[in-house]
Image (cartoon, rainbow, N blue to C red):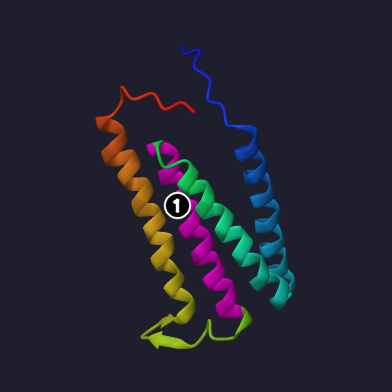
Amino acid sequence: MSNEVYAIPLRYRKMENLHIVFWLFKDISWCMIWRPLGIAMIFPTLIIAIVIAIRTRQYMSEVCHNIAIVVWIAANSYWMISEFLNFDTNVLFGQYTFKHLAIIPFALGVLVLGYYYVWWRPRHMDVVETM
């Protein structure tokens, strides 16, 4: 049993909490079809996610998960915009529509986490990441 503690500086935690507020407003706006607010909320949500990823770049576990969050928000935001602007169902090719382009950033997030869990972490089991 390990007694190690993972602590997040308070200023980072406050930023993460504010990030959740923006993210919820973005998704509520999407659900309620409040186009201007939904699109406006993309910017603070994405910017804070990027800042969090940059601030945690020295910790492989944190930066990989935070990059996955950045591309998730990007994919989610693109999907929302495609629905708001009514091009989500336009055919891109074959059975794929423009909404399906969101799979690119979603897949990037899976690849980043796959890199961390399948490649990096097994080779660095002795690394203890503390803040």
> Is 68 part of what is drawn in magenta?
yes
> Is 56 part of what is drawn in magenta?
no
Q: How many marks?
A: 1
Question: What residue do we see at 60% from left, 32% from top?
Answer: 9
Question: What residue do we see at 38% from left, 47% from top?
Answer: 113
Magenta span dominant secondary structure: helix
Question: What residue do we see at 54% from left, 65% from top?
Answer: 76
User: At label 1, which amino acid type do we have?
Assistant: Ala
Q: Where residue 32 sits in the image (x, y, percent)?
A: 75, 71
As drawn, 108 above or below 61? below
Q: Is residue 116 left or right of residue 70?
A: left
Q: Where residue 102 sits in the image (x, y, percent)?
A: 46, 70
As drawn, 7 above or below 49? above
Q: Where residue 75 sits in the image (x, y, percent)?
A: 49, 66
Q: Where, by quadrant of the figure, is residue 35 drawn?
A: bottom right
Q: Which residue is more in the foreground, 50 or 86?
A: 50
Q: Tag 1's secondary structure?
A: helix
Give the extent of the magenta segment. Answer: 60-83
Q: Where, by quadrant of the figure, is residue 34 drawn?
A: bottom right
Residue under circle 1? Answer: 68
Q: Where residue 36 sits in the image (x, y, percent)?
A: 71, 76
Question: What residue do we see at 38% from left, 38% from top?
Answer: 60
